[in-house]
Image: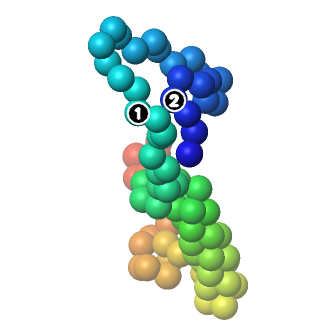
């Protein structure tokens, strides 16, 4: 545990007002495990890589792109060409 009033991570702490006592020790807070933390970002990037390579393999096996596989017509233009 660290003593209060010491610079932590380059930030300066404010002086305590008169009559207010400081606790002797800071509580130890465990690192976050929910939200935008390194572990969640790492898991998300791994899932994206698996999905990307699975799509490439699927296209190679079927010989068509994802949209054609899903039955969506592609390559016909937007329908308002001159």
- Comparing 57 with 82, the one in front is 57
Residue 40 position, x and y percent, is: 52, 61
- Comparing 56 with 37, the one in front is 37
Note whether residue 70 is visible.
Answer: yes
Residue in view at x 55 percent, y 33 percent: 3
Residue in view at x 47 percent, y 40 percent: 26
Residue 72 position, x and y percent, is: 42, 72
Residue in view at x 62 percent, y 76 percent: 50
Q: Earlier in the sequence, mark 2 or mark 1?
A: 2
Q: Which residue is mark 2?
A: 4
Residue in view at x 42 percent, y 79 percent: 71
Residue 16, image quadrant? top left
Check whether the beta carbons of the residues at disc 2 and disc 1 lie within 8 A of each other.
Answer: yes
Q: Which residue is mark 1?
A: 23
- Comparing 82 with 78, the one in front is 78
| Helix, strand or loop status at disc 2 | loop
Q: What separation in Å lies between label 2 and label 1 (alpha carbons)?
A: 8 Å
Q: Is residue 58 above or below residue 18?
A: below
Of the residues tagged 2 and 1, which is closer to the observer? 1
């Amino acid at each position: 545990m660290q003593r209060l009033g010491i610079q932590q991570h380059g930030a300066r702490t404010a002086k305590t007002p008169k009559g207010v006592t400081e606790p002797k020790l800071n509580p130890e807070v465990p690192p976050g495990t929910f939200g935008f933390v390194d572990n969640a970002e790492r898991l998300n990037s791994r899932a994206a890589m698996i999905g990307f390579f699975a799509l490439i393999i699927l296209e190679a096996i079927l010989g068509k792109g994802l949209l054609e596989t899903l039955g969506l017509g592609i390559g016909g233009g937007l329908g308002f060409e001159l």
